[in-house]
């Protein structure tokens, strides 16, 4: 089947030229994916993304320059529509939590098969609320076993409205804020609860007595 949608544009940031070249060759062999640029440092990454505004940025976690967390924070501030997927040889839970809180949409070990990367790119691009993780079971277990941080009152309010199946735009109207702010609250909620989706976050919050089913339905 021929894809009629516009191609998904991708930028690659890694300090190893051979890795970038191999990744570009793999991605451009896939239908509907186009690599629009490459960079090797955090500063070059910022310039590249500001210039090309790709749909997806593949970012090496050990990029020379600023830390990956600082780079993600700056990128999310300057070009919020570019979705960031981290590629890494390391999957420690603390780093993963920091990067998720900073706004990444995916974290994949460099040992993943190419088709997993392609699937992650398509999922992140096509499903705005999806976060894609491909890390070790040990790292996931450590994240899940860590005590969940308490949600702020605003995060609880957002989650209660999400439990009513309201869209981000509807939630923003209810609490008099922007849709981007709602998305940021949801990302933080997902990280704090270790949730993979809205439904998962709602269920985890109910199980942890952070919200209740009756409270979630009270505004219907």
Image (cartoon, helix red, strand yellow):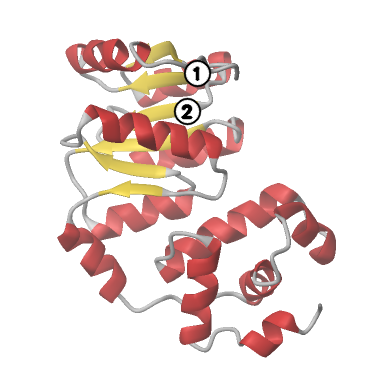
Q: Which mark is residue 59?
A: none
Disc 1 is placed on an element classified as strand
Say which residue appears at 34% left-offset and 22% top-offset: 13
User: Which one is nearer the viewer's eye here, 196 or 46?
Assistant: 196
Left or right: 98 as drawn, with respect to 62: right
Q: Quadrant of residue 146?
A: bottom left
- Residue highlighted by disc 1: 9
> What is the CA distance from the residue labelled 2 to the residue labelled 1?
6 Å
Quadrant the C terminus occupies:
bottom right
Question: Which residue is tagged 2?
Answer: 56
**Would you call the spot at circle 2 few (<14 residues within 10 Å), some (14-19), or many (20 or more)?**
many
Residue 33 spot, x, y in % from top left:
44, 17
Measuring from the top left, give residue 72's x and y in whole percent: 45, 39
Question: Which of 167 and 73 lies nearest the eye of the viewer?
Answer: 167
Residue 73 rendering spot, x and y as whole percentages:
49, 42
Count the numbered circles shown.
Answer: 2
Q: Residue at position x 34%, y 17% from top?
A: 27
Residue for point 18% across, 53% down: 136
Q: Is residue 207 visible?
A: yes
Helix, strand or loop status at disc 2: strand
In the image, residue 10 above or below residue 116 = above
Circles 2 and 1 in contact, beta carbons < 8 Å: yes
Q: Is residue 66 visible?
A: no
Determine the image quadrant of residue 18.
top left
């Amino acid at each position: 089947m021929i894809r009629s949608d516009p191609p998904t544009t991708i930028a690659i940031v890694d300090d190893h030229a051979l890795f970038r070249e191999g990744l570009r060759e793999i991605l451009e062999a896939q239908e509907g994916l186009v690599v629009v640029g490459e960079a090797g440092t955090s500063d070059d990454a910022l310039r590249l993304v500001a210039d090309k505004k790709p749909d997806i940025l593949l970012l090496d976690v050990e990029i020379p320059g600023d830390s990956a967390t600082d780079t993600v924070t700056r990128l999310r501030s300057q070009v919020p529509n570019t979705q960031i997927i981290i590629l890494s040889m390391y999957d420690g839970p603390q780093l993963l939590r920091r990067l998720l809180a900073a706004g990444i949409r995916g974290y994949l070990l460099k040992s993943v098969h190419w088709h997993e990367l392609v699937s992650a790119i398509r999922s992140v691009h096509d499903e705005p609320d999806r976060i894609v993780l491909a890390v070790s079971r040990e790292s996931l277990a450590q994240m899940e076993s860590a005590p969940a941080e308490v949600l702020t009152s605003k995060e609880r309010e957002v989650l209660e409205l999400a439990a009513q199946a309201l869209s981000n735009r509807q939630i923003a109207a209810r609490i008099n804020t922007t849709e981007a702010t709602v998305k940021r609250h949801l990302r933080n909620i997902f990280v704090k609860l270790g949730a993979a989706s809205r439904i998962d976050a709602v269920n985890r919050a109910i199980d942890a007595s952070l919200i209740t089913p009756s409270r979630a339905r009270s505004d219907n």
